[in-house]
Structures are given as structure tokens and as C-alpha cells.
Amino acid sequence: EQAEEEERLDNDGEEGEEIDEEDREAKRARLLDEYAKARIPKPPLAEANFVMKTLSDDDQAFMRRALLIGLERGGSVGRSPSELNRLARGEGHRFTVRQVASAGMKDGSVTFPLGSVDVRVGSRCRFFVRDGDFARREVEALWTGFKRKELEGSLFGNGSGGDEPGAGRPTGCIVLPTLDRGAKLFGGKAGFESGLVSEYLPDVPSVSGFFSNGVVGNLDGTVSAGNANLPGSNENTLWGSSSQYVVFRSKSNRPVFSPRRAREEAAGAASAQVRDAAMDSKLAAEDAKRIQLTKSFGDTLAGEAAPRAPNGELIVRR
């Protein structure tokens, strides 16, 4: 019976191994089939419809509202697939996001705004949606990468951070968001971006800015501008649904005049002066009171004779 039990267990183990092997073969065949299908060129709209079926209801609503396609910048060799991790390390954005201007329903093609981008064969793309939570984390990761580059520059570079040699410490910042990046995008929190800039640049005396319909500038400095070999280079472009941060620096590191700080210092000096005047008045009143008590006590003693015993000795009262 023991031998039969061991034989039965051996047979079960062999059957389990055969089932695992069959599952691995089936999974491998399914992956090969999916890979073969993925290599077949498909129109962007067909791919968007396929991707949309795998998304949640909220993401599907975002994707139907505005179709956004990101084109990879400068290749992906040695780069992190996570956009937030890249920004936190100061590596810049991996994709340049564009909004589709028009689409062909017959052939499933999409058209970007005229002159905005040169799409090349073999370029990687990714579909994007607008999400307030991701936008908040993106801004935080972007400024984390900025502070990291500042620290690396101060320790190993020019001694003061910045993108150029000899760049001084930040002395001012202008925040230029587009109209759709207000309190509604960041969960009803007004002034989110300017407040975040103040946290990451605590020594900057002035953070100002205004909303606009678009901003003009380069995306970041991680891809060289005007390089024909790199798609999506860092040229100056008109951007929508974006925020631009302009950081001012002082090469001489001289103190920068801040009206707000000057008002605070003036108010502090005025309150200190009022406090000192009140203290002086209080001390003068106490001195006058002491002088009056001393004078009254002296007048009282001057009109009376000192108490003496019958033998003429002074009587000391304790």
C-alpha cells in the first residue's frame, strides 16, 4: 500500500508538471500571437479604440473629450519608463504630448496642428488623458528634479546650480499657466502651482505670474535643440494646456530688494518702537511712584521724633 501511494503521488507530480508545461506553452503562444498582432501597422484611431476598451469609465470619458498623443523624444535607450521618476531625477519629459487637430474616419488617420511636429517612421507614441491628480504629481516631480539639479550643480558643478556655468542662486520666479490649469484641474485648490514654487524656492522673495492662452518656450534642456537626428528636439514651440516657469538668477549674489520683505521689516521695526516706548513709559511711571513713596515716607519721619526708651536708647522695631 505504501508503494502504491508513492507511485500515485509520483504520477500526480508528473501530471502537475505536464499541466504547468502546457500552461507555459499556451501562455508563450498567446504572447507570440499578441506580439505578432502588435507588429502589424494599425491606424491611430483603431489603436485608440482598442486601448479605450481596456480603460476605466473616467479615463474613457477623458479620452473621448480630447485625444492626446505623445511622441517620444530622443529615443528610449537607458531611460526610465516612468514619467514621474524621470522628472524627479531631472531627466525631463520622455514624450511630447500633442492634441489631435483632426481625424479621418475612413482610414483612421490623425492630423496634428500644421507645422507643430515632424512624425517619422518608427517613432514611438503613447495616448494621454488629462488628469488633475497626475498633473499635481507631475508638477511636484518637476520641481523635485529642479532642486536635485541645483544640489548637484552646487556640489559638483559651478557651485551655485543652474543650467549654465556661473549661474547664481534663484532670486525670482514667474509662473505662466494656461487657462485650463487653474483651481478646477488641481481639485479646487487655488494657487497650487505658485504655492508649490514658494515651497521649493523659499529664499525667492517674489513669485508672480498670470494665466494665458498659451506659452512659448522649450520643453526642457534634456534634448538638444535643432538636432535633426533626434525627433522631438528641444526647439521653442507654442504650447497649450501647459505651465511655464521662468526662474531669475543673480550672478553677483547680491541681496535682491523685496517690497514685501521691506514692508515686513518696516512693520517689525515700528512695532518694536511702539513696544519700547510702552516699556519706557511703564518704567517711568514706576520710578515716579517710587519717588513719591520715598518722599511721603521721608516727610512722615521728619515730623515725628524717633522712639526712645526711658534710658534714652533708640527703640528698634522689627
Image: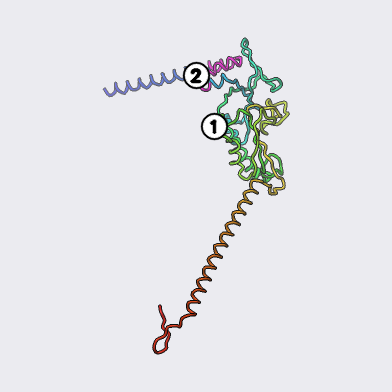
Q: Residue furthest front?
A: 303
Estimate the x, y position of residue 46 in percent, counting from the top left: 58, 14
**As shown in the figure, which amino acid type bears the numbered disc 1?**
Gly
Looking at the rendering, which quadrant does residue 318 occupy? bottom left
Q: Which residues are magenta?
A: 33-59
Q: Residue furthest left?
A: 1
Estimate the x, y position of residue 171 in percent, counting from the top left: 67, 44
Query: Viewer-proximal residue, 261 or 196?
Result: 261
Query: Viewer-proximal residue, 71 or 240?
Result: 240
Q: For residue 188, which numbered disc appears in the image? A: 1
Residue at x-position 69% and y-position 31% = 218
The answer to whether 56 appears left or right of 12 in the picture is right
Local packing at callout 2 (Cα closer than 10 Å; few below 14, some 14-19, many 20+) is few
Q: Residue tagged by mark 2?
A: 28
Badge 2 element: helix
User: Which quarter of the image is occupied by the N terminus?
Assistant: top left
